Image: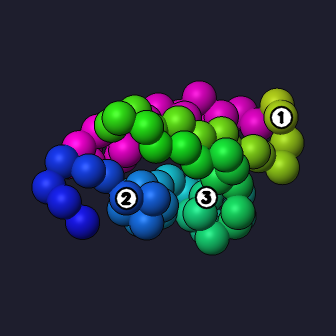
Amino acid sequence: MSRGIVEPDAVLQALRIVQDPDLGRDIVSLDFVKELRIEDGQVSFEIELTTPACPVKEQMHDQAVSAVSALNGV
């Protein structure tokens, strides 16, 4: 991995800190992370929850953005 280039595995590893509080597992192992794309240091993905009206949806989104933004190369 070149310095400054973020790899998909690094993004997924960073996202493992985001937990679904009801299921007690991270969003990666729950297969909630969809459509992961990396282009020119820009990372995008979707979080597909089991319930669209999840009360902690925004909190999980904010945690995911924070985790990925902290990666070198993003």
Q: CA distance from mark 2 to mark 3?
A: 18 Å
Residue placed under numbered mark 3 in the picture: 27
- Give the left or right position of residue 17, taking residue 60 as reference: left
Sequence-wise, the earlier of marks 3 and 1 is 3
In this view, the residue in front, 5 or 55, is 5
**SS under mark 2:** loop
**Residue name at image x 75 percent, y 45 percent:** 48
Disc 1 crowd, CA 10 A, few/some/many (<14, 14-19, 20+): few
Q: Quadrant of residue 58?
A: top right
Amino acid on which disc 2 is placed = Glu
Magenta segment, principal secondary structure? helix
Disc 2 crowd, CA 10 A, few/some/many (<14, 14-19, 20+): some
User: Which labelled disc corresponds to residue 52?
Assistant: 1
Amino acid on which disc 1 is placed = Pro
Residue placed under numbered mark 2 in the picture: 7
Specify the segment rendered in magenta: 54-74
**Residue name at image x 76 percent, y 37 percent:** 54
Is residue 36 in view from this perspective? yes
**SS under mark 1:** loop
Amino acid on which disc 3 is placed = Ile
- Give the left or right position of residue 23, taking residue 36 as reference: right
User: Which labelled disc corresponds to residue 35?
Assistant: none
Q: How far from the left and from the top, in percent, is residue 71?
A: 26, 48
